[in-house]
Amino acid sequence: MTLYRFLRKSRIIIASLIFILVFIIFNDLYEWIPSGIARTVLSFQFVPSLLTFLATFSLIAGGGFLLILLITLITGRVYCSIICPLGIMQDIINRISRYTSKKKRFFRFKKEYPVLRYTFLGIMIIALITGLGWITVWLDPYSIMGRAFTYLLKPLITWGNNMVAVPLFHSMNIYSFFHHTLLHPYVLPVILSLAITVAIGYFAWKRGRLFCNTICPVGTLLGIASRFSFFRVRFDRNKCTRCGKCAAICKSECINIKNYSVDNSRCVVCFNCLDVCPEAALSLRPPLKPAKTKSYLRTAEAAQESVGSHDSNRRKILLTFLAFLVGNRIYALKKNRMPENQKDLLINEKEHPVAPPGAGTIERFNNICTGCSLCVSACPTGVLQPALTEYGLAGFMQPHMDYLTNYCNFDCTKCGDVCPTEAILPLSLEDKHITQIGKAFFVKQNCIVFTDETDCGACSEHCPTKAVKMVPYKNGLLIPEVEQAICVGCGACEHACPVGAPFKAIYVDGNAVQQFAEKPVVKELKQQGPEEDFPF
């Protein structure tokens, strides 16, 4: 086995393991992977690592992107070929297309699209500088793949677990597998995730790494760095017979046989061309000192022609994302028309959405979150859902607390444990118990104790801090009362309220800046009478 064949097979094995590991992290129904391992694996995703560094200025927490840049300066775009899950997915799709096609499919050298590449990179840089997190959501390759795992694959895996795994293993008296609630995500995130995944899959099926070398800003940035990499794929003109095997297998379409050149800014260092070349005319090596020969002059002339063709491509202006800038909403809000039986009820007016515990401030959260949906996938109650209009355009597809779906478990810190960008900071259980992400508000006019004069108390029964308590009302009835100082905004009261949205009798309004709630006062029970021994 030659060195390059060994490198190619090693690349396939490592990429497969990383893809499977990331897939399991997003679909870990039984929490087999510790959160510490998950955070370590995801710390080498470029954009999440960069955002973590910008938020914390800690190389320990967010230095993964610097390591990726260093590796790129040494060996080229290895990240795109081995670490990026979206890149690996494209390789899988392209390999399937080549094996299933009736006719042999070959790649050909294609000119790059510099206007598109650098425009998308510029948009990403502006988004990072100005804190436009909603743009990052759509351009970060890791987040695109994360949403595909969360909204497209996890519901299928959960369904398969409930329909197949649980009955099968239970029939064998193995009870480590159990039923999971199948939570249906919003329709719009599913449609958008499906459309983007299908589009990228189509590009991969037809043109290999077209998305990576045309749209992906991470690929473009690493491509710029790879122009200066120490080891690059290079031609030996004296050995090359122009058989074309290398260009035919190059999924980046960056090998130009006519000019004996490789566009290293698009090469993802997959080692396919190095392994397939029968004459060993291609090699991964550092630059050699050029001799002043005719051969060198011809190479220089070819390079000059390549630069000329590169410059001639700068003709088009990209207007993508202009539609997103037209308004501050993705789609119209629901109409607030009240049916006749609810004409006297008051609509819940929330000043702020409820961000996940550990977000700090909504502004900070919107600036850092990439909308990868790992927290949505990891949330055991499903209360975290992708935002549509809740944050406005700034936080589209970023997670928010949807209390119609469920409520936040009082003893859960999972979202902060898995967040790769620290948009959701990890909290100790003690801090989580007093982190106030919002405050509950009671609307007496909507409460069925007031409207129907009947007992309820569901909100008080579900409140973990007893911020909602029942007080005397009339005719022997009790009605809720909220002590906001000890309320943590978990949403258990809102979720349990039997009144339909948006007319809940009790609802949680989010805190723009999360605070610490007061600890509830625990009263000791007074002993009545002398202590007596147990009678028998």
Image (cartoon, rainbow, N blue to C red):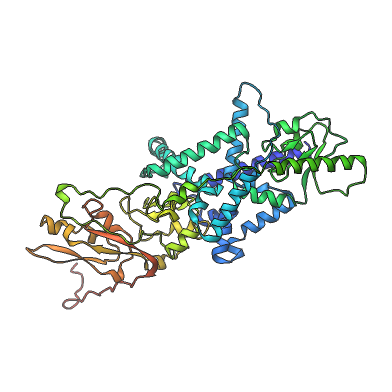
x, y (%) of residue 97?
Answer: 59, 29
Identified at 55% across, 66% down, the residue is 56
x, y (%) of residue 336?
Answer: 25, 50
Identified at 25% across, 75% down, the residue is 524
Identified at 68% across, 28% down, the residue is 106
The answer to whether 471 appears left or right of 9 in the picture is left
In the rendered image, which quarter is residue 282 located in?
top right
The answer to whether 528 appears left or right of 83 in the picture is left
Q: What quarter of the picture does the N terminus occupy?
A: top right
Q: Residue furthest top?
A: 102
Residue closer to the observer: 264 or 298: 298
In the rendered image, which quarter is residue 450 located in?
bottom left
Residue 301 visible in the current orientation: yes
Q: Is residue 135 positioned above or below 174 on the image?
A: below
x, y (%) of residue 424?
Answer: 46, 60
Q: What quarter of the picture does the C terminus occupy?
A: bottom left
Residue closer to the observer: 339 or 177: 339
x, y (%) of residue 160?
Answer: 42, 37
Residue closer to the observer: 66 or 83: 66
